[in-house]
Image (cartoon, coloured by chain):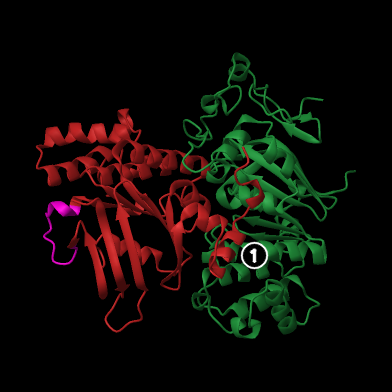
Chain colours: A green, B red
Amino acid sequence: MTTDLLSIDGLGVEIAGLPVLSDVSLALPSHGVLGLVGETGSGKSLTCRALMGLLPRIGGRVVAGSINFAGNTLTEMDERGWSRVRGGQIGFVPQASLNALDPVMTVGSQLRESVKHLDPGAEVNARSTELLELVRLPDPQGVLRRYPHELSGGMRQRVMIALALAGRPRLLVADEPTTALDVTVQKAILEVFADLRAASGMSLLLVTHDLGVVADVADTIVVMYGGTVVEVGNTTQVMSAPAHPYTAALLGARPASRAPGERLVTIPGVPAVPGQWPTGCRFVPRCTHAQDVCRIEQPVLLPLTGDRSSACHGWPGQSEEAPTHV
Amino acid sequence: MSDLLLEVTDAEFRYAKGSAPAATGINLEVRAGEAVGIVGESGSGKTTVGRGLVGSLHPSAGAVLVQGRPWKGMRRRDPVRRVVQMVFQDPYASLNPMLSAQATVAEVVRVWDGAKADVATVRAEEILAEVGLSGEVIRRRPAGLSGGQRQRVGIARALACGPQVLVADEPTSALDVSVQANVLNLMLDLRARRGLAIVLISHDLAVVDYLTDRALVMLNGKVVEQGDTRTLLQHPSHEYTKTLIGSIPGKPLAFSP
């Protein structure tokens, strides 16, 4: 048995018979922070939905592989079993959650409902206040009495995180939790995550398209493209010497990666769309290093030196420090 | 003629008479070919100033002059209106859903140049090619375009009347970083090729650093600091600017090759 809190092994997902994820694998230890990155349509959010057991609601199903959490195989559970884990042991902050609060219920009534349901032993009012303190909301008593529309975007996002924490989760899955927020608010929320990890040892799976955010908070980075994982490794190492051309392009596209006025790296073409995945490597149509083998054979995620892995047949122009195949 | 295109003097903007001003004490000059950044968070008044620059909001005090003339009272077809054009944050919301990319741009050419429909169509094709859109794509409506393509159409529409200043309000915030790179490269090209001045309104300091020469930092409707972008970011003097810079994620990796 592994010591990982969460491991996803060779996960394949279909929606209405169309493959949307294939061979997705990742592992997250206790106390770990994993950053899941990729462009729109790369499969990040679908991976979260699969993990939360929310695929049936969008007509999707797991067709291959498994999701293992704290010694249980989630993919073998029925809806009842999954719903005991979801919200309790795994907290979820969905994407665009700023609009996910009930507009006609006060923050307090929503939070108390979650506490009653997920944390039966707790003193409801005290715990609700404590949750708002955990996410560093000033004046928690006042916030409990308010309706969502009376709160700013940053405050509502903190309430969403407080709700996700109600069941004292061992893992928090947060899908783009800071994307629509101001940078100062974003920083405050990332600090809340760091506090929670330090205080309770909670693990975090953070989905984001912002490599800067990943650099700041994640130990491990998992890069997705075209519904599969293309690179995995230690965040600092991956960001300084990417092993996959897609990761390299994402990094080079950041304005901060170039001196002012110097041209940014662009990725030609558009992201791979489910149903139109090319044979061979899915990144081939956009890759400037593609060779013949890339068009024929899909590269698998192979281990590299330095406890890293990438799915690439090899490309010239890699940095000197980049890992090699073991 | 001087190369002064936009001049804002002690301007104050309000959305309703008697309401609190959304921005006050704004002073700004934009000259030909310059790139100026307006930085701030939600509610700082940066978009309000942008609206003032393009003449969609008139100052309640002070003045906004475009080539020396106030927006207020300018006729609808006054040629000075060509000088300043706007690029919006959400191209999907700002493009006519019923018009193809080509028709969107051609309409502007027809209206401003009095061109016949067939001439305007050809001209639209040229302008769209300049922003990197050609072939069958230009006959698609916004719903059939990707986010990056839509933003290119938004820029092409702004270019169609031959402006000298583009005021871009968060032009890349809704885009993936890879798509953002395309749009930023395009703005660099347009500046180099057409000598366009750019006013970039953004909360993203990395983007402002990358694209602009000068920048203003706004907080609660006021400019708290302004100056050369590099100096401002490397040696901020106002506390708020320091806080903003301290909040940029992934800073240790900035400027790594």
- On screen, residue B64 versus residue A258, left or right, reads left
Residue at position x 35%, y 41% in the image:
B191
Chain under label 1?
A
Give amino acid for label 1: Ile
- On screen, residue B45 versus residue B56, left or right, reads right
Image spot of residue B167 (x, y percent): 33, 53
The quadrant where residue B226 appears: bottom left
Image spot of residue B215 (x, y percent): 43, 57
Verify whether residue B257 appears in magenta.
no
Q: Nearer the viewer, residue A159 or A199?
A: A199
Q: Is residue B146 visible in this depiction of the protein?
A: no
- For the stretch drawn in magenta, what is the main secondary structure? loop
Q: Nearer the viewer, residue B23 or A150?
A: B23
Residue at position x 24%, y 47% in the image:
B163
Looking at this rendering, what residue extends furthest in the right direction?
A1
Verify whether residue B77 appears in magenta.
yes
Looking at this rendering, what residue extends furthest in the top direction?
A292
Q: Is residue B155 visible in this depiction of the protein?
A: yes
User: Which quadrant, please, contains the C terminus of chain B?
Assistant: top right
Residue at position x 57%, y 28% in the image:
A283
Image spot of residue B46 (x, y percent): 40, 64
Give, as a single range, the part of the protein colored magenta.
B70-81
Residue at position x 82%, y 61% in the image:
A201
Vertical side of B137 occupied by B84: above or below: below
Image spot of residue B96 (x, y percent): 27, 49
To which residue does mark 1 refer? Answer: A189
Vertical side of A9 occupied by B19: above or below: below
- On screen, residue A56 versus residue B203, left or right, reads right
